Image (cartoon, rainbow, N blue to C red):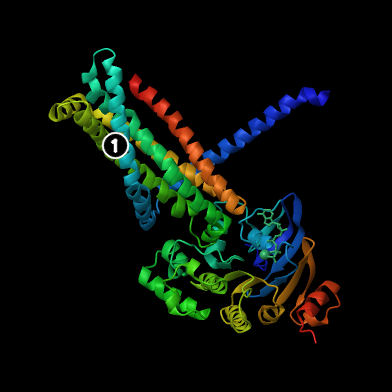
Amino acid sequence: MSAGAPELEWRGVRKILGGRPVLDGLDLSLDAGRSLVIIGGSGQGKSVALKLALGLMRPDAGTVLFKGQSLPGLFNRRQSDLYRQSGVLFQGAALFDSLRVWEVVSFRLLYADNRPPALARDAAIEALAQVQLGPEVADLFPSELSGGMQKRVGLARAIVGAPRILFFDEPTTGLDPVTAASISRLIADQVMRLGCTAVTITHDLVSARTIADDIALLDGGRIAWQGGRADLDMTKDPRVRSMVEASMPTR
Amino acid sequence: MQQLVLAPFTIIGRLVIGVCAIVGALSLFVGRTLFACLTPRWHGGQIARQVVSIGFLSLPVVGLTAVFTGAALALNIYTGGGRFNAEQIVPQIVALGITRELAPVLVALMLSGRVATTIAAEIGAMRATEQIDAMRTLSTDPFRFLVAPRVLAGVATLPLLTGVADILGIGGGWLVSTLSLGFNPEAYARSTVAFLEAWDIQSGLIKAAAFGFIVTAMGAFHGYRATGGARGVGHAATQAMVWSGVLIFATDYLMTSWFTQT
Ligand SMILES: Nc1ncnc2c1ncn2[C@@H]1O[C@H](COP(=O)(O)OP(=O)(O)OP(=O)(O)O)[C@@H](O)[C@H]1O
Ligand SMILES: [Mg+2]
C-alpha cells in the first residue's frame, strides 16, 4: 500500500451504457476522513460513478483505486476489504423486501458477522433511532413503509456496524426539511466525530453545505468544477451559479 | 453481392458467438453455485425456508398430478393390454411407468411451472431493485444467501416429492383398477409389490435429484441475468420455465439410456 495515497480515486474512468459514454475521463479523488459531495444534473452519471467506486460495475477504461490499489475482480480481496469497511445507501433504498425492517438494518451483523439475533436487533433499533425512526417500525416489512421511511431504513442499514467509508446516493431526497436537516447533521457527525470518509450524492444544496468538505460538479461525463464548501457561493462558474441560484428562494 | 455471399456466415457467426456466450455464462453460474452449495458457510434459516416453499407447499400439486396420471395410465394399459389378452399386466406396468419415468418427470415439470418461475421472479426483482448489489456491499455473497439455499432445497426435496408421487400414482392406478376395471384390491397390491425392484424406485429418485438441480438452478440463472425492470423479470420467469422443461426432458433421456444400459 503506497503511503499518502488517497482513500478512493477515480482515474480516467470511462463507462459506456446504452451505447453512449455516460462517464468519459472522470478524475476525482478523496482523502481519508474527508467528506466529498457530488452534485450535478439528473442523468449525468452520479449513481454510475458510485457503483464504479464500489466495484458493482466495471469501467470500460481507466481505473478505480481504493487505498492506492485498483479494484479489478469479482473475488478480489481488496474488494471484500472495501465492503467490510463501507456502508452504502442506494438511490432506490434497495431494502430486502422478504425480510423485516430490523433484519434488513442488521443484515450485515446477522449474516456476515454471525452476531446473535438479539444483539443484532438491539443494534438495528439503535440505528433506526439515529434516523428518527421508532422501534415500532422494526417488525414491519419494507413494503409497509413510506418512501421517505424506506430511505431512512436504507441509511440505518448503511451506518450500522460502524463502517469507515460511507456512500450515500441522495440521502435526503423525499424527506421533509426537518428530517432532512437532521439526516444531514447525522452524516456530518459520522465524518467529523467518528472520522469516517464519505461520498454523498445530492441535489440538496442546503444539505451539501452541512455535509461537505469538498464539492464536485459532475457534468458531461467528467468533473466540471471542484471546490470547498465556501467556494460554492464565491465561484463564477456558470454551471455552479445556476444550480446555486435555482436552489435559492425566489422573491 | 459480396454482402449477399457473406450473409449466411455472418448469421452463423453471430449465432455461434451467442451460444458460446450463454454456455459460458451458464457454466460460470453453475460453477459458482456448486461452490456455494458444497463449501461453508451455509445459511440454515434460508435453506429451511426454501424447503418449505419448494417442497412442502408443492405437495398438493404433486399429489393431484400423480393420482390422476396413475389412474389414466391404468385405463390406457387396460385397453392396450386387452388387444393381446394381457389385461392382467396393469399393476406391473403402472408401477414401472410411475416409478421409473412419470413420477420424476411430472413432478419436475410441475415444479418448473411452480418453482423455477417463482425463483426467477424473486431473484430477478431483487436484481432490478439493486438488492443484489446491496447484499454484496454488506459482505454477503448472493450465491450463498439466495442461490445455494434454493438449489440445495430443490435437490433435497424433489426426491421426496417423487417418493410421494410414486405412492399416490400407484394408488391412483389401484383405485381405478379396483373400482371400475374389476381387479381384486389385494391381488393388485400384492402383484405390484412382488414386481417392483428397488432399482425401479431408486433410479427415479436419482433422476428427481438431478431435476431438482435443473429446476432451481435455471430459475436462479435467469433471475440473476434479468435486465430491464418488470418486463425483464417476466421474461426471466418464462425463460426459466421453458429451459428447465427442455433440460428436464433431455436429461431424462440421457439418464434413462444410461440406466438401462447397465
Ligand atoms: N444499467 C444501465 N443501463 C443502461 N443505461 C444506464 C444504466 N444505468 C444508468 N444508465 C444511464 O446512465 C446515465 C446516468 O445514470 P445515473 O443513474 O448515474 O444518473 P444520475 O446522475 O444518478 O441521475 P439522478 O440524479 O437522476 O439520479 C443515464 O442516462 C442512464 O440512462
Ligand atoms: Mg442517481
Asked which quadrant contains residue A83, the reply is bottom right
Q: Position of residue A30 (x, y in %)?
A: 68, 69
Q: Is mark 1 within 8 Å of ligand 1?
A: no
x and y, in percent, of residue B124 in the image: 53, 51
Q: Position of residue A131 (x, y in %)?
A: 53, 78
Q: Secondary structure at mark 1?
A: helix
The C terminus of chain A sits in image quarter: bottom right
Classify the position of ligand 2 by quadrant: top left, top right, bottom left or bottom right: bottom right
Going by the image, does B223 lie left or right of B110? Answer: right
Placement of A170 over or under B11, stated as above or below:
below
In this figure, which residue is indicated by the disc labeled 1? B67
Give neighbour class at mark 1: few <14, some 14-19, many 20+ (Cα, 10 Å).
Answer: many
Q: Residue at x 48, y 62 (%)?
A: A97
Q: Residue under mark 1: which chain is it in? A: B
Rendered-image quadrant of the N terminus of chain A: bottom right
Residue B206 in picture, x, y percent from top left? 33, 34
Disc 1 residue type (three-letter)? Val
